[in-house]
Amino acid sequence: MMTMEQKRLSKTSIASLMAIATYRHQRRSGRVWQIGGKRISGTTVARLERQALLKEIAPNGTPVLILTDEGKRLIATTGQAQQHT
């Protein structure tokens, strides 16, 4: 069985996590999420939720996406790897 560190994420998934970590303005528009200037499909969000990298919460009835500790750790290691290349 593979651990989370051994699983490879797509470039889209990594870019989505980076956008969620970077931008505060998020809103759901139909089946897509508008995060900053980036549109992320609901399928990508659902896949990242299944992998426990982010979760959707609704404080005050407004849905927002937040990174879990595992997602934050992945972003930190991915960011360091991109700086070295």
Image (tube, helix red, strand yellow):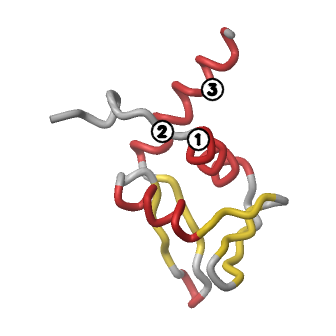
Q: Write down the quadrant of residue 14 in the picture.
A: top right
24 or 82: which is nearer to us?
Answer: 82
Quadrant in which the C terminus is drawn: top right
Instruction: Name the residue beneath numbered marker 2.
Output: 9
* Residue at 75% across, 55% down: 23
Instruction: Say whether disc 3 or disc 2 marks the residue closer to the N-terminus.
Output: 2
Q: Dots 3 and 1: beta carbons under 8 Å?
A: no
Q: Dots 2 and 1: beta carbons under 8 Å?
A: yes
Quadrant in which the N terminus is drawn: top left
Instruction: Name the residue beneath numbered marker 3.
Output: 79
Residue 38 percent location from the top left of the image? 78, 58
Instruction: Say whether disc 2 or disc 1 marks the residue closer to the N-terminus.
Output: 2
Which SS class for mark 1? helix
Residue 8 percent location from the top left of the image? 43, 33
Instruction: Say whether disc 3 or disc 1 marks the residue closer to the N-terminus.
Output: 1
Q: Which mark is residue 14?
A: 1
